[in-house]
Each structure stands twice: as structure tokens, then as C-alpha cells.
Amino acid sequence: MLRAELDAIDLKILRELQEDGRITNVDLAERVGISAPPCLRRVRKLEEAGIIRGYRALLNGPALGYDLVAFCMVGLKHQAEADLKAFAARTRDWPMVRDAWMVSGDSDYLLHCVAENLAAFQDFVLERLTATDNVDTVRTMLTIRKVKETVPVRL
């Protein structure tokens, strides 16, 4: 399903679900101005098309003991496709890495890391990340505070 195939009702459904993923189908239908059965069919169609990838709760990391957020810019020694894929696969095995992007510029990857504390993050960087085959450089940035969080995709 392409964006061109989404009509105004589909876009309203997506906006509402981004704001409240736990909304009932009846309430969602009411908010977007259609009855419940076609609303549910539209939601299922958006899910099947992969436009809605899933539903999840947003948790408060510091309240759960994850006080440190950092970003790591990683440069690889070799950038052949197999090397890039191998590093990307490796990031999936590191629970501390919450998001990873292949990037252009001075680095090859940008990693979003969340740790319990500075010592745990340092252990990860020194014992796991920099020790990984093909890693050439690692530059880290510790965050001070989050000043903006925008989850929804702008529609």
C-alpha cells in the first residue's frame, strides 16, 4: 500500500492510533467518522500492508533503572556489503543498543544505547563494541537530558 492509496480516513486512523494505540475500535471509528466494522477492516488492511508495524507501551527508562542514554558513532575498517551486514547483525545481539542506523559521513553506524549507569556503558564500549572485529573507531556522546520526544510519524 502506497501513501497515494491512503485516503483521508486512513490518515485519520493512523493519527489517532499514534496518539493512543489502546483506543477501542468503537472509539476510533467515532473519532474518524465511520462505523466500527469498516474501521476495523481499514485497520487490518493497514496492518497487513505493513503501514502499522505493531503496538507497544512507552516505558519510563529511568524509573526502571536505565539512567544513561548515549549515542555511539562507529566507524568500520572495511565497508564491503558483507562487513556492513555482519556489524548490523551484531547490533541485534546487544540489548544495550536500542536502535541502530547505518549512516553516511564520518561514521558508518549510529547506535542509540541505554544503560543502567556509566560503568555498565563503559564496559559495553570497551569490552564488546571496540573489541568487535572490523570496528575501527568509536566516538561516544552521553546525553544530558531529553528535550523533545516525538513518536508519531508526521502525516
Image (cartoon, grey):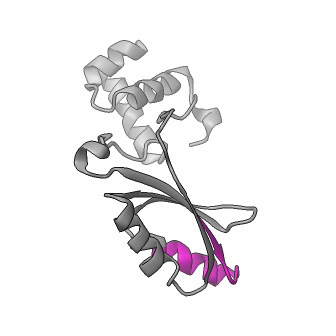
In the orientation shown, which residue stands out farthest toward the bottom? 133
| Residue lying at 37% horizontally and 14% vertically, measured from the top left | 31
Q: Is 138 situated left or right of 113 in this image?
A: right
> Residue 32: percent from the left, percent from the top?
42, 16
> Residue 89: percent from the left, percent from the top?
49, 75
- In which quadrant of the rendered view does residue 45 lie? top left
Front position in the image: 146 or 112:
146
| Residue lying at 47% horizontally and 38% vertically, measured from the top left | 146
- Report if residue 70 lies within the magenta region: no
Q: Is residue 50 visible?
A: yes
- Report if residue 87 lies within the magenta region: yes
Question: Is 72 located above or below residue 38 in the figure?
Answer: below
Magenta range is: 73-90
| Residue lying at 58% horizontally and 77% vertically, measured from the top left | 85
Front position in the image: 28 or 135:
135
Front position in the image: 146 or 25:
146
Q: Is 104 situated left or right of 122 in this image?
A: right
> Residue 99: percent from the left, percent from the top?
48, 57
Q: Is 61 situated left or right of 134 in this image?
A: left
